Amino acid sequence: MADLIFGIWRDEVVDRRGGAAVAPATLPQFEKLDEFEPGNRILAIMAWDGVAVFDDRVDVVDMARAYMEMAQAHSCGKCVPCSMGTRVIADVLARIVDGRGREEDIASIRRLAEFIRAGSMCELGRSSVVALLRLLDHYEPEFRLAVGERRRRPRGHYHAKVTAPCIEACPERLDVPRYIEYIKSGRYAQSLSVIRERNPLAAVCGRVCVRYCEFQCRRGRLDEPVSIKHLKRFVADVQNESALRGEEPPAAGRNGCRVAIIGAGPSGL
Ligand code: SF4
Ligand code: SF4
């Protein structure tokens, strides 16, 4: 585990810049983060609720640029604050990194980020700017320097992983947001096929799962978590009923392979 130089996650902050070891060496959320693979150290992280910097060579301005470009690439385009707002922020940050920043850019980025946070339709948009705002709060002099220097900065290499708290909490890493989105638009067969990419027993898990995902669901901070488990049960039941009515295409024939299942029900997964 690498020691933090700077880290923030929700309301917890560790700031050891300038050698001031007045804070703990890490935060629990970053404890297990060390290397991508042996010899390839993680130098910094930006994620939905914060930032971690483990190495003082990290260019946080370029990291913010790369992060917002990735957020923009995953915006579905349904609402303007997220789809257009992330585009504008990513473009302004790219301009700053290319040495063409303007004095007013930082205030504009902040204003726009607040707008995205307040006005986006879903959590992808709302959470896309949290880490950026936190960087602006704690690294504003670095952003101002990048604007004032007017020199092209080298662009770093970043590894992006798109996930959600519910996906990370699920032992099977089910793509929960995707199957819920399909249910929302009435595309139940597509929803079930997303679940079946990783779990062939959707109806069973929709009944017996202990719901690690729901305990982590961000919606729970507002009122109640999304009923992820019951939605899985719902879509599995709807599709089973439609199969019983003969509306489903017939199952593929035998292919000569045999599979041994050890354990009953979900334990046989
Ligand atoms: S906030 Fe959600 S709904 Fe709106 S564009 Fe972004 S991903 Fe789509
Ligand atoms: S189910 Fe909850 S945790 Fe998962 S994407 Fe939706 S709001 Fe986020």
Image (cartoon, rainbow, N blue to C red):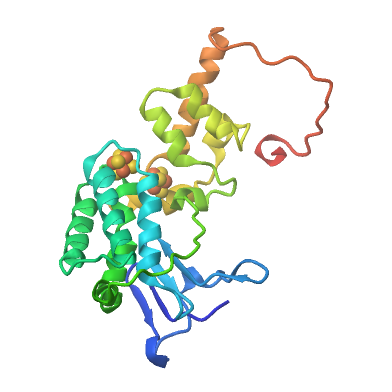
Quadrant of the frame with the C terminus? top right
Say whether residue 161 is visible. yes
Q: Quadrant of residue 131?
A: bottom left
Image x and y of residue 191, in percent: 48, 29
Say whether residue 225 is visible. no
Q: Is residue 50 above or below residue 25?
A: above
Nearer to us in this view, 88 or 18 = 88
Quadrant of the frame with the N terminus? bottom right
162 horizontally vs 92: left or right = right
194 horizontally vs 75: left or right = right
Nearer to us in this view, 94 or 71 = 94
Image x and y of residue 41, in percent: 58, 71
Image x and y of residue 127, in percent: 32, 54
Image x and y of residue 31, in percent: 53, 73
**Residue at the (28%, 36%) spot, across then down:** 78
Q: Quadrant of residue 197?
A: top right
